[in-house]
Each structure stands twice: as C-alpha cells, then as structure tokens.
Amino acid sequence: MKFSQNQSLETPEINITPLVDIVFLLLIFFMVSSRFTDETSLRVNLPESGSGKTLNETVNTILSITANGKMFLGNHAVKKSELSTELARLKEQPLIIKADEGVAHGQVVEALDMAKSAGISKASIATNQSR
C-alpha cells in the first residue's frame, strides 16, 4: 500500500487582522468620548454678582489671584514684577481676572492697570452668579 505524501506541511497561523481592527475601533471610541477640558488646579473663591454675564473661557487668557496674593497666568505662577512682561505677549487676547474674594481691591486694580498698560483692551473680572 502506498500512502500519499502530499500532506501540507504548512503551520497553522492565527489571523490577527480582526483583533487589530477591534483595538483601533476601541481607541477611536475612547478618543471621541473623552472630554478635553482645561481645568486649573487653582481654587479661587469668586465674589458673587447679580449682573454678570457668561463668558467663553476657552478663548480667553485667565489671570488668577489667590487669597494669599499669588498670581497665576493660565497654570503658571507669575511674580508681580514679571506680570506686565507676560501680559505684553498677549496683547490682542481678552483677559479674565479671577481674584479670590479675600484679595485686596488694590491688587485687582493694579492687575487691571498692568493689563491696560500692556496693551490688553478687553479685560473682565470673573464672579459667581448670585442666587
């Protein structure tokens, strides 16, 4: 008896193409469903105001002044002596000042004055809406 020797000697392979497709679909799903927000880690207790209006903070530069008087431009700490130089770089951008309600009025006025002298024409002060 003669047996056929034409048996295939190929090794079985696992096709990973569907696995790669699923991984890419999951990656796209999580990228689309995630939220991209610019949240600052600064906690500033804003004063309340009844006549305020809502501004879009994503297109504005934010100057935060904490209760102990430290200033942050965006998320970066700024010394008072460096503030006017930093603000001069932002000439045409609107500025929002988020000052803690415990900050002295003079420090907020001084920040507004520095913004004006740096060429910023649109500056506003952030408040919470009163209930």
Image (cartoon, rainbow, N blue to C red):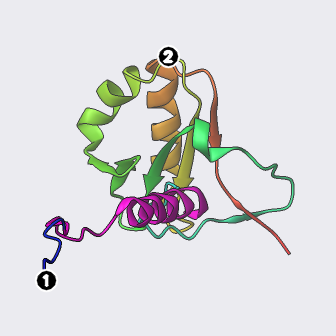
Q: Check disc 2 and give the amino acid type.
A: Gly
Q: Is residue 26 magenta?
A: yes
Task: State the image coordinates of residue 81 (x, y, percent, origin top left).
Answer: 24, 36
Q: Where is residue 61 in the image (x, y as percent from the top left)?
A: 51, 38
Residue 66 shows in this picture: no
Looking at the rendered structure, which numbered label has been put on residue 119? 2
Q: Which residue is drawn at 43% across and 67% down?
A: 67
* Comes first in the chain, label 1 or label 2: 1
* Residue neighbourhood size for the residue with mark 2, other residues' Cα within 10 Å, grouped as few (<14), some (14–19), many (≥20): some
**Amino acid at pointer 1:** Met
Asked which secondary structure carries label 1, the reply is: loop
Q: Please tell me which residue is depicted at 46% across the width and 59% down the height of the picture.
A: 21
Mark 1–mark 2 distance (CA, rounded to whole Å): 100 Å
Say if 89 sits above or below 57 in the image. Answer: above
The residue sitting at 44% across, 55% down in the picture is 65
Q: Badge 1 is on which residue?
A: 1
Disc sitting over residue 20 in the figure: none
Q: Tell whether 51 sits left or right of 65.
A: right
* Relative side of 86 to 50, left or right: left
Query: Percent from the top left, x then y, of residue 79?
Result: 25, 44
Image quarter where the C terminus lies is bottom right
Please say if 122 is above or below 57.
above
